[in-house]
Image: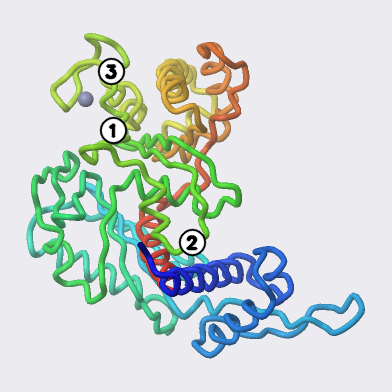
Amino acid sequence: MPSKRASNIEVKKINRNRIFRYVNKYERVSRPDIASALGISTPTVLQNINELLLEGLVLEVGEFQSTGGRKATAIAPVQDVFYAMGIDITQNHVGLVLTNLSGEILRHKRVSKIYRNKRDYYKEMADIAKTFLAEGAGTDFNIGGVGISIPGIINLLSNKIIYSHALNITNVDCSVFTEFIPYPCTFINDANAAGIAEIYHIEDKFNAAYLSLSNYVGGAIIQEHDSFGEHDMINSLLYLGDNLRAGEFGHMTLVPGGNHCYCGKNGCVDTYCSAKVLARHADESLEKFFEELKDGNDSYAAIWEEYLNYLAIEVNNLRMVFDCRVIIGGYVGSFIEPYIARLREKAESRNTFETDGTYILPCRYKVEASALGAALQCVESFICKI
Ligand SMILES: [Zn+2]
């Protein structure tokens, strides 16, 4: 049974964490604001703010206009106290993101680099990351962690990439990726990372299925969660399943006996909804496909219509299983916004229970969502310890 003293320490830690998160989120708040918004007593708020000021995690930034009585001092987070870098490793690219405690993309870059499971590659990847940081106009970033996003199944307990079809690796130790990176590193599946990035900043958290439509189809299942608290928010948000394979939406059967999938089966969602399905008609360029579609190319319009028919079935299936919002992400997701009404219409026509397709959302991040999500793991683990 936990002692009363232990539980008091726990409450103190939770209050301190909630106070810091509140300041970090709203960026300019007063002590009375914090007390009233969080329902924490004024003396507790004063004590915690004093401690955070002493530790250099928050600072005073002037006063609010008075509405009578004493002017309240404005408190702001010191966001530059911690930076994190996200690295997204794909078959053909290395994506990079820099963030701080704001959790927003401060800078990003994408470099062509064909993946090879060779020491040379890992050295070159680390050099790309170092160059990216050095490009920060003379700023010496205090990098506290690096999050690495991988298109594969990762077992963090055994510290192994169990399997990645895209990278063509099985049971590779995570440490080989990080040998040349001079910062603490964490790993996350690419679709899980992108899903986290999508909902991280949303005020009212919600359950969501994130459907990643890139060169392969994947996804993430995100559970509504109170972002305040001392626990690791990122891991609480993700449903990973019994074998870490939850969200493998690409291998749900869409058409029995249909197209042959790289996994060896037939009719998988991947063979109807991956970005490759569209890009193959436009010299392997998804940008070109969508440019011509916008310009009224009739044959592309027919391909797109058929694609949306399959996508609507998949989205409706996800709605039936999870009864939650479905976020359309990945490479195709970054182009989906002008066509979201059409997709909703098609999904609505399949739905047994509702006629409103507004549960289908276009992704917020058009670039580097996976790299950002990976970096957010580091940001969260820093904030959790405050
Ligand atoms: Zn398959």
Above or below — where is 248 with respect to 54? above
Above or below — where is 77 with respect to 289? below
Q: Are marks 1 and 2 in contact (CB under 8 Å)?
A: no
Q: Tell me the SS state at disc 3.
A: loop
Residue under pointer 3: 253
Residue 234's spot in the image, x, y percent? 39, 54
Query: Which part of the image, by quadrant, shows the N terminus?
Result: bottom left
Residue under pointer 2: 229
Residue 284's spot in the image, x, y percent? 30, 34
- 48 or 111: nearer the viewer: 48
Amino acid at dot 2: Gly
* Residue pictured at 74% horizontal, 83% vertical: 73
Residue under pointer 1: 248
Q: Residue furthest toward the right?
A: 68
- 344 or 243: nearer the viewer: 243
Give the spatial CA distance, label 2 vs label 3: 39 Å
- 19 or 191: nearer the viewer: 19
Check residue 30 in the rendering and tell me which mark sits there, or answer none.
Answer: none
Foreground: disc 2 or disc 3: 2
Amino acid at dot 1: Glu
Q: Tell me the SS state at disc 2.
A: loop
Above or below — where is 242 with respect to 226? above
Give the spatial CA distance, label 1 vs label 3: 11 Å
Give the spatial CA distance, label 1 vs label 2: 30 Å
Residue 112's spot in the image, x, y percent? 27, 55
- Viewed as shown, does residue 336 lie left or right of 370? right
Q: Which badge, 2 or 3, comes first in the chain's sequence?
A: 2
Residue 325's spot in the image, x, y percent? 52, 33
Q: Residue furthest toward the bottom?
A: 54
Q: Which badge, 1 or 2, comes first in the chain's sequence?
A: 2
Query: Which part of the image, by quadrant, shows the C terminus?
Result: bottom left
- Viewed as shown, does residue 211 lie left or right of 164? right
